[in-house]
Image (cartoon, rainbow, N blue to C red):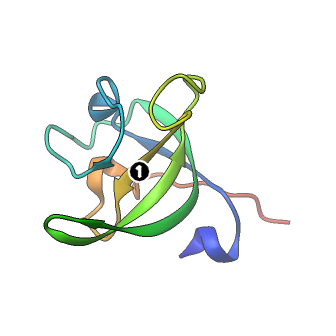
Amino acid sequence: KAVGTIGPISIAMNSDPLQLYYSGIISGKGCSHDLDHGVLVVGYGKASQRSGETKFRRVKNSWGKIWGENGYFRIKRDANNLCGIADDPTYPVL
């Protein structure tokens, strides 16, 4: 919810699920809390999937527009600190 009130949030996360990411919503398989990559959470939303509606965070990566979904990826929201994304968030205080 901070993204909606503060703006983009810089986070650290485990990059293992990003290595072969092409599209879709990362759900946590093969993801640890070993933080080794910095990314920027820029938004959130919901998507209809076979298993029902899934809430996600929209995240900008630093690997260029040819990677992922035009340089972005989606990761499941409300998923118990998936990939350690809630361990080390940062945002500006003015």
Q: Secondary structure at mark 1?
A: strand
Q: Relative to 11, is 30 on the left or the right?
A: left
Q: How many marks?
A: 1
Along the line of sight, the residue nearer the viewer: 53 or 76: 53
Residue at 47% x, 42% y is 12
Residue 13 screen position, x and y as percent: 39, 41
Residue at 26% x, 43% y is 33
Question: Quick one: which residue is furthest to the right in this view?
Answer: 94
Q: Amino acid at mark 1?
A: Arg
Q: Relative to 24, is 4 on the left or the right?
A: right
- Quarter-of-image position of residue 36: top left
Give the labeled residue for mark 1: 74
Along the line of sight, the residue nearer the viewer: 49 or 28: 49
Residue 4 screen position, x and y as percent: 63, 74
Q: Relative to 51, is 40 on the left or the right?
A: right
Picture layout, residue 60 above or below residue 7: above
Residue at 48% x, 25% y is 67
Residue 61 screen position, x and y as percent: 54, 35
- Quarter-of-image position of residue 3: bottom right
Residue 71 screen position, x and y as percent: 55, 33
